[in-house]
Amino acid sequence: MPQLQLPIFPVGVTEINTRVAVEAKDGRVCYIHGHLPVFQHEETDVWSFRMFTSQMIVNGTAQAKEIVQTFGVPMGTVKRYMKVYRDYGAKGFYEPKPRHSSASVLKGEILERAQACLEEGQSVPQVAQELKVLGNTIHKAIRAGRLRQPQKKVQPARLS
């Protein structure tokens, strides 16, 4: 039968709950379970903080609300990183994630048609409607330099 650990924490620690406490000292954060240190990381290492607090929640050592109260982080953030831990484990916090950029909808003939419409003086919403794409797609192509929006001609004011 397992023996119970008495929660005897050193002076100067912050209790997360009756079993786990945390201590920040000399630029390091140390997590203590009972009276034994179980994990530590640099104060600036946010990814290790997210990994270990998520691990404690998933394993039942702490509750999400206790992490929120102790560290002052938003509940949404805690839940997001709990999901990362459940889906990928500890490696989900340290392995680089591949960056996915969306493929451009405006290619070849469609890009040429969009440029022709803009040069005819059509507005971005009109071009988007004609090509059956989102207006944001046209704006993104303009910002990226793949489309040029002709300058509007300003008529001089008439003096009467």
Image (tube, helix red, strand yellow):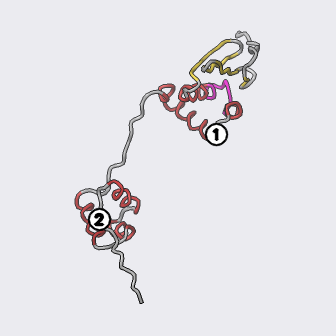
Write down the quadrant of residue 41 in the picture. top right
| Viewport quadrant of the N terminus | top right
Q: CA distance from mark 1 to mark 2?
A: 44 Å
- Name the side, left or right, on which 39 lies relative to 120: right
The reply, left or right, for residue 25 in relation to residue 87 is: right
Percent across and percent down for residue 48 are 55, 25
Q: Which mark is residue 86?
A: none
Question: Which residue is found at the position 32% from the left and 65% from the top?
Answer: 149
Q: Identify the residue at horizontal 27%, vertical 60% (top origin).
A: 111
Magenta segment boundaries in residue numbering: 56-64
Q: Quadrant of residue 83?
A: top right
The kind of secondary structure element at disc 2 is: helix
Up the image or down, 21 lies above or below 78; here it is above
Residue 115 within the magenta-colored segment of the rendering = no
- Direction from residue 98 to residue 23 in the image, left or right: right
Give residue 136's quadrant in the image: bottom left
The foreground one among 2 and 107 is 107
Tag 2 residue? 114
Mark 1 secondary-structure assignment:
loop
Q: Which residue is mark 1?
A: 74
Q: Amino acid at mark 1?
A: Pro
Q: Is residue 96 above or below residue 13?
A: below
* Outermost residue, bottom side: 160
Q: Earlier in the sequence, mark 1 or mark 2?
A: 1
- Packing grade of label 1 (10 A; few <14, some 14-19, many >=20) is few
Q: Quadrant of the C terminus?
A: bottom left
Please state the horizontal and vertical placement of residue 78, each as a whole percent of the image.
Answer: 61, 35
What residue type is disc 2 on? Ala
